[in-house]
Image (cartoon, helix red, strand yellow):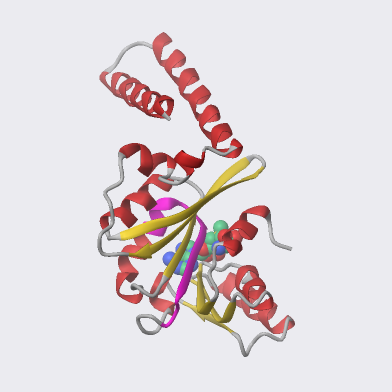
Amino acid sequence: HLSPRLKAVLQFIPKSRCLADIGSDHAHLPCRAIQDGRALRAIAGEVRSGPFHQSTSNVAALGFQRYIDVRLGDGLDVIREPGEADAVVIAGMGGELITDILERGKAKINKETALILQPNIREASVRKWLNENSWTIINEAIVEEPPHIYEIILARKETAARKLSELELKMGPILSIRKELVFLKKWKRREQRLIRILQALGQAEQTAELARKREESERELRLIRVC
Ligand code: SAM
C-alpha cells in the first residue's frame, strides 16, 4: 500500500512508455505504476546496495522482472541514453539533493520528459533550478501525511519559461493561487513558527548574526503574509 504522499506522486505520472524512479528505495512506486498501467516499463534506480537488493526481490516477488529494470547507480546515470525514460520521478529527498541530481543528469532529460519531483524540504531550490533551466511547472499538489506536509511538482521543458517571483518560488506558482486548506495550514504553521523565532530573537542579546537572522525572518514573514 502506498502512503498518501506516494499516492499523490503516482497520480502525477502521465501515461508513459518508460518511467524512471530515481532513489526508488523499495521500488514500491514503479511496481504500482506498472500494476495500474501508468507505465509500460520502468527503471528503479538506487545508489545504495541494500535498497537495490530489496527492490530486486520486491520486483521478483510480483513477477515484474520483464517490466521493471532495477539498476544500481547514482542519480540519472541509470538512464542509459537521453530520452530512454519519458517520465522521471525523484521523490522523498531534500530539495538540494534533487537539484544536484538534475544538474548532473541534465543530458538525460529533454522535451519529451515529464519530471515529477517531491522534495521533503527546500522546495524553493527545486523550483529555482527548474525556472533557471527552462522547465515549466505545469501542476503542483500538496498533501498532508501527519505530521508532515509534502509538495509535489510536475514540470516539462519549454522554451519560453516565465520567470517566477520570489513568492512563487517559495510557495509554488500553482499552489499559491489555489490556496487549498493544506496549503493554508502549512503557511499558517510557518507564520506561527516565525513569530516565535522573532520573539525569542527580541529577547536575546543583539549580535550581528542575530540581527541578520531577524531580518531574514521578518522578510519571510512579510512574504508569507502577502499570500
Ligand atoms: N523515492 C522513495 C520515496 O519517495 O518513498 C524513497 C525515498 S528515500 C528517503 C531516498 C532514497 O534515495 C534512498 O533509498 C537513497 O538511497 C536514495 N538516493 C539518495 N541519493 C541518491 C542518488 N544520488 N541516486 C540514486 N538514489 C539516491
Quarter containing the C terminus: top left
In the depicted structure, whether residue 149 falls above or below residue 197 = below
Q: Quadrant of residue 80?
A: bottom left
Q: Is 70 in front, or is 142?
A: 142
Q: For the point 39% across and 76% down, which residue is it?
A: 77
Total number of numbered labels?
A: 0
From the viewer's perspective, tell me whether residue 103 is left or right of residue 22. left
The reply to whether the magenta stretch includes residue 174 is: no
Q: Is residue 39 left or right of residue 36?
A: left
Query: Residue placed at 46% from the left, 15% from the top?
Result: 200
Q: Position of residue 167 (x, y in %)?
A: 36, 37
Left or right placement of residue 169 versus residue 93 in this view: left
- Depth check: give the residue in front, 40 or 28: 40
The span shown in magenta is 84-99
Q: Quadrant of the N terminus?
A: bottom right
Residue 109 appears in which quarter of the rendering? bottom left
Task: Return the x and y of residue 117 as percentages of the image width and height.
Answer: 47, 59
170 above or below 195? Answer: below
The quadrant holding residue 73 is bottom left
Q: Nearer the viewer, residue 86 or 208?
A: 86
Against 66, residue 57 (above or below) is above
Return the x and y of residue 215 as percentages of the image width and height.
Answer: 31, 22
Identity of the residue drawn at 55% across and 33% down: 184
Instruction: Establish if 187 lies above or below 113.
Output: above
Instruction: Name, please, the residue furthest toward the bottom.
Output: 66
What percent of the width, then of the height, locates residue 192? 52, 22
